[in-house]
Image: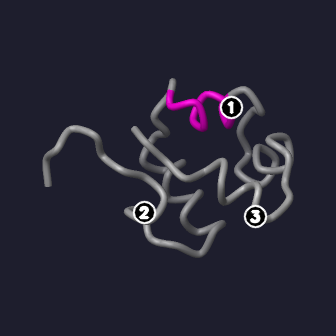
Amino acid sequence: MKNRLKVLRAERDWTQADLAAALDVSRQTVNAIEKEKFDPSLPLAFRVVRLFNSRIEDIFEDESGGG
């Protein structure tokens, strides 16, 4: 799933470790999501949007073409 996590993190000058700590996940999880190797669970996706005070569709993009 495409996402803007790396851009949003960089805008705040956060490391992957900073973001991981804020989301209560490992730095490897943040890295895998940013590299689009791992799709976050729904609860994790909601933690991300709350942290960035955004909407889910503004951070994550479904590549399946559905909708």
Which class describes the residues within 10 Å of circle 1: few (<14), some (14-19), or many (20+)?
some
Residue at image position (84%, 54%) is: 14
Question: Which part of the image, by quadrant, shows the N terminus?
Answer: top left
Q: Marks 3 and 2, how far apart in space? A: 18 Å
Q: Which mark is residue 11?
A: 3
Bounds of the magenta segment:
29-36
Residue at image position (51%, 24%) is: 37
Residue 13 occupies quadrant: bottom right
Q: Point out the tag, 3 or 2, that comes first from the N-terminus.
A: 3
Residue at image position (75%, 64%) is: 11
Q: In the rendered view, does 37 fall on the left or right side of 23?
A: left
Q: Which mark is residue 31?
A: 1
Residue corresponding to mark 2: 56
Q: Marks 1 and 2, how far apart in space? A: 19 Å
Q: Point out the tag, 1 or 2, that comes first from the N-terminus.
A: 1
Question: Which part of the image, by quadrant, shows the C terminus?
Answer: bottom left
Residue 49 occupies quadrant: bottom right
Q: Is the magenta region chiefly helix, strand or loop?
A: helix
Q: In the rendered view, does 20 fall on the left or right side of 33?
A: right
**Residue 61 placed where, x, y %?**
36, 50
